[in-house]
Amino acid sequence: MIQQPSTIVRTVVNLLVPFIQLFALYAIVHGHYGAGGGFQGGALLAVSIVLSRISNGAESLERFSSTRATVIAAGGMLLFGLVGIVPMFFGASFLDYEGLPLFWVHGAELRYLGILIIEVGIALAVFGTLVLIYDSLAGDKW
Amino acid sequence: MRLLGFALVSLFLALMVYATGGLPDRGNPEAPGHENVWHYYLEKSMEETATPNVVTAVLADYRSFDTFGETIVIFTAGLACIVILMKRLK
C-alpha cells in the first residue's frame, strides 16, 4: 500500500533540510582545515534535496527541477575546467592556480583561493549529478 | 554506426594496453610511487598553499588533475543515467 508521507514526516524533513544544507556549506569550506571538501559537501547538499523529494514528492520537483540540477552539475564542471584553463592564458600551466587573474592575492594565498574555487566546483557537480541520478531512478520525465 | 562504436572502443582499449607498457614494473623499488614524495608534501604544503590540511592540498592542488578526472567520471555517470533511465516527454 502506497500512501502519502504523514504530516509529521513532512514537517520534520522541511525543518531538517535547511540545517543539512548549512552543514553542507560548512563541509565544503572546512576542507582546508579538517574533514570535509567538495565531494562530501556536494553529497550532503544532494541528500537534502533527495530527502525533500522522498517526503514532498511533486512539490519538491516544482521547487527544484531536474533541469536545474543538470545546469548546476554542468556549471560546476565548467567552473573546474575554467580554473584549469584560464591560467594557461596567463603563462602558467594547466590547473596552476598561481596563474589565476586575481591580482590582489599572490603566491600561497592564491593557491589557497584556487583550492576553494575548485572545491565549490566539485561540490556543485556532485550535487547536481546525485540529484539527477535520483531523479532518473525515480522515473521523472525529461 | 555500431561498427564505428566498436572500432572506437577497440582503439581505446589498444591505446590503454599500449600505455600499460610504460608503467613501472610491479614491486619495483625505484618506481616514482616509492620515491618518498610525501616528504615534500608534508614539509612544503603549508608554505606553498597556505592550507593546513595536507590531504586537501594534495587532492586539490598537487594532484588536481586527478581530481578533475574524478569529477568528470561522476558527471559522466549522471549523464549516462539521464540517457538510459529518464523517460522522455512525448
Image (tube, coloured by chain):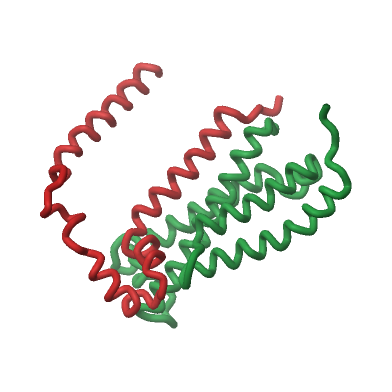
Of residues B59 and B71, the one nearer the viewer is B59
Q: Which chain is red?
A: B
Q: Which chain is green?
A: A
Rendering coords of residue A50 (x, y %): 68, 46
- Identify the residue at image location x=44%, y=75%: A102
- Left/right placement of residue A104 relative to residue B7 reads right
Q: Residue at x 29, y 68 (%)?
A: A91
Position of A101 with respect to B17 (left or right) is: right
> Would you place residue A116 above or below residue A15 in this image?
below
Residue A89 visible somewhere in the drawing: no
**Image quarter of the N terminus of chain B:** top left
Residue at (34% x, 64% y) in the render: B58
For the residue pair B8 and A132, the one nearer the viewer reads as: A132
Counting from the top left corner in percent of width and height, residue B49 is at 36, 74
* Name of the residue lying farthest toward the right: A7
- The relative height of residue B47 versus residue B1 in the rendered view (above or below) is below
Q: Total number of numbered labels?
A: 0
Residue A137 falls in which quadrant of the image?
top right
**Is residue B85 something one can see in this rendering?**
yes
Residue A117 pos. (x, y %)? 48, 66
- Which of the 4 image quarters holds residue A15? bottom right
Residue A2: image x %, image y %? 82, 30
Location of the C terminus of chain B by quadrant is: top right
Looking at the image, residue A39 lies above or below residue A23: above
